[in-house]
Image (tube, coloured by chain):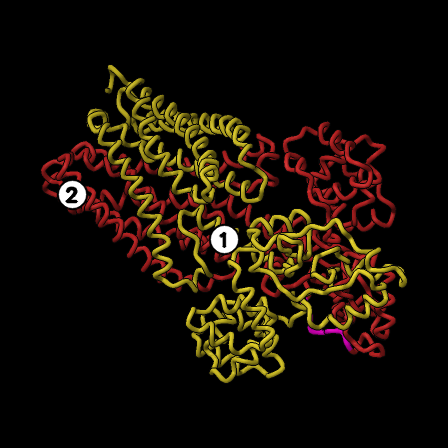
Chain colours: A yellow, B red
Amino acid sequence: MSDGIIEEPETSVDSWDTLAPEERVKYFHGLPYSERDDFFLALSARDQAGLILALPEGERRIWMRLLPPDDATDLIQETPEEERAGLLALLDDSARREVVALLAYAEDDAGGLMSPRFARLRPDMTVDEAIAYLRRQAEQVETIHYAYVLDSEQHLLGIVPLRRLMSAQKDQTVREIMRTDFLSASEEMDQEALAKLFSQEHLLAVPIVDKEGRMKGIVTVDDIVNVVAEEASEDIQKIGGMEALEGPYLQSAFKEMVKKRGGWLAALFLGEMLTATAMGYFEEEIARAVVLALFIPLIISSGGNSGSQATTLVIRAMALGEVRLRDWWRVVRREFAAGLVLGCMLGVIGLMRILIWQRVFHPYGLHYMLVALTVAASLIGVVLFGTIAGSMLPFILRGLGLDPASASAPLVATLVDVTGLVIYFTVASIIMRGTLL
Amino acid sequence: MSDGIIEEPETSVDSWDTLAPEERVKYFHGLPYSERDDFFLALSARDQAGLILALPEGERRIWMRLLPPDDATDLIQETPEEERAGLLALLDDSARREVVALLAYAEDDAGGLMSPRFARLRPDMTVDEAIAYLRRQAEQVETIHYAYVLDSEQHLLGIVPLRRLMSAQKDQTVREIMRTDFLSASEEMDQEALAKLFSQEHLLAVPIVDKEGRMKGIVTVDDIVNVVAEEASEDIQKIGGMEALEGPYLQSAFKEMVKKRGGWLAALFLGEMLTATAMGYFEEEIARAVVLALFIPLIISSGGNSGSQATTLVIRAMALGEVRLRDWWRVVRREFAAGLVLGCMLGVIGLMRILIWQRVFHPYGLHYMLVALTVAASLIGVVLFGTIAGSMLPFILRGLGLDPASASAPLVATLVDVTGLVIYFTVASIIMRGTLL
């Protein structure tokens, strides 16, 4: 957690992304000495890593040692494997031990966000002793807003919010004022679950304990703000129909980006080929009533759009914990009703469109009324199907242990396209039998 | 900012959403007295509002008065207009004045997130005096992690992080240790911009000042975590092709939800009608070569999918500030290259598919090679167009002062569908002239 007070960002930092490594070094060296540390600390871990690696080796140490261990860990995680040992060697022994320990955690675990530098108290201190002791620790710890009360085996006994300590009587003991009804998290807790905890409980920091209840470190809310944004980015990119990128768009390697988009695009394309197969079955119908072909894009895209709405709603509600797996039946009922209303709405608009066009331009021939009815009825069926399929796919994926966000708008559209064609031609063959077909 | 230490959530809170108002009251009354306040404070503003309104009038006051003014404001904003005066009347005079002042700010402004209860110091206090003074204020303020140094006209002179105060010498003055190079925000700053500031600068709290530099209040990071999640939800729902809902999915009124989805769905449908018009122009071609119709869904959906990927990438990058309006040319070049690579990839897959099917099932007649080449060339054109259109639409919307997230996957798909048909039939008429057409 930083001091929270930082100079107004330079306008030139805005264009930082667009600078080549040498230009970054030049800009950095151009800053007055007194501003360089604030500037460096304000950079993201990724940008810090880029800058450090661009600096001459002799200059790297002071910047590495400026960082607290959790930030140094983040920086090292942003560097290529072969550079890591070199950067680690720049740290002092104690910081290096901490960073090596933190590097052992997966990046997405609570342990990976954790800082080992927290404020400690003993339970038998008085309030005045505790305040004096915290004043001595203040420079070294990540946050002094909470002090963690540990026994001699490092078991976490309680937490003292600084606010409570400050307003307590001088002669009370830490044990008397500490809170024992606190939340803690395990080292393996997923960072997304941890973010949900912070947001629901309005926490500033959470202690991380091992299975024996021994305190390992703390995760602070400033790291969580970034986790929330990162997880949302991943979901948004998946909803857009691609694998999530690992870094900012403009900084992602072109090859990585094309790979992450191409994989899904090819998979969707293979799925979409079923439309050509389905259309093959209806080739004769199309030849007999070409007018049917005119509405194919309109019908299948309406199913895709309504499915896309339903799937994004459900994915986001799941990500925020508003909807759980067991809510599926409530969602089905709700989406069935919504799909029916929306389908009827589009059906009426479609019907009107064809009748008005027929009045004005006469494009649809003698049986225009049958065409109009076919389109309207198909729209109701396709929108209803799209809505239900779109809302249920995230449940199915989660039920299978997959990420519900993979039920992207394009995936749902692809699923619905094939079914939409079948619905459309089935409805047509019922309504038009004996006339056009 | 809460104490940050709260009991383990009851498992039954998980199903809180599913309870009717009476059941919530019953559950709430079933809790031991000592647990009710923690339970109430841990609820979201929306749930607090629902519970308060379900409680008998005589019981409401203690719960309203339990809340700090910014949380009371949030609660009141979640209630229907006609209930607000009644709830305001329950507050004591001083809290009511603060809440009324906060209610004047738009919900999405910095002012709407602000708390007027911050820790104050005078510049000429000594460190020891300041600590003693803060200990007296600790119970009343939103956070004591920063103390704000004000002159007699409430102008903000500097900020003292508690950590710095705790580690300073006893006889230094506040003026000597305060930081004067701090960030502040105006009352009108948009909450999304504010969230970006918190995330980029790793802030815990930001002071809000008026045009004359007078301190109005503070915004703390715990409110920002929710803002980040809310803004991401809005973007995700817009990307899915609908207006953003105001509350959680399952708690949104059915009518509101259908309206927000139906509006966009109808607009997209009207746009998609252009496909029927476009198809009308090619009716003769389809009649002559029905085989062309078979690949229409495949072609247009490939354009929609690649456009959806590009638009979500750019929307998210814009929301995070990674891409700015002036970066449009860099994005065009990047997306042109990506679109070309992806288009060629799909073109090759499409070509293979047709040639293999022809080998095995002979469905495409004598001129199957022309069909295959038409499909492959169209795929390259459509994917390239979809990618560029999808990536540029957010820029155009932002340039017009609109929300780039409205460039939803369905909107891009609709745009690309019409163009895709034109590309496909144009390519067909060039390649097949004199043979099939």
Task: Please state the horizontal and vertical placement of residue B313, each as a whole percent of the image.
Answer: 44, 54
Q: Which residue is mark 2?
A: B355
Magenta residue check for B412 = no
Which contiguous range is marked in magenta? B177-183
Question: Farthest top residue?
Answer: A434
Q: Residue at x 73, y 46 (%)?
A: B7
Q: Secondary structure at mark 2?
A: helix
Task: Please state the horizontal and vertical placement of residue B209, each as a whole percent of the image.
Answer: 73, 63
- A400 left or right of B47? left
User: Taken as a whole, is the magenta stretch helix, strand or loop?
Assistant: loop
Q: Residue at x 51, y 39 (%)?
A: A313
Which of the 4 image quadrants contains residue A323? Answer: top right
Q: Which residue is mark 1?
A: A233
Hey, what amino acid is under mark 1?
A: Ser
The chain holding disc 2 is B
Hey, what amino acid is under mark 2?
A: Leu
Magenta residue check for B181 = yes
Q: Secondary structure at mark 1?
A: helix
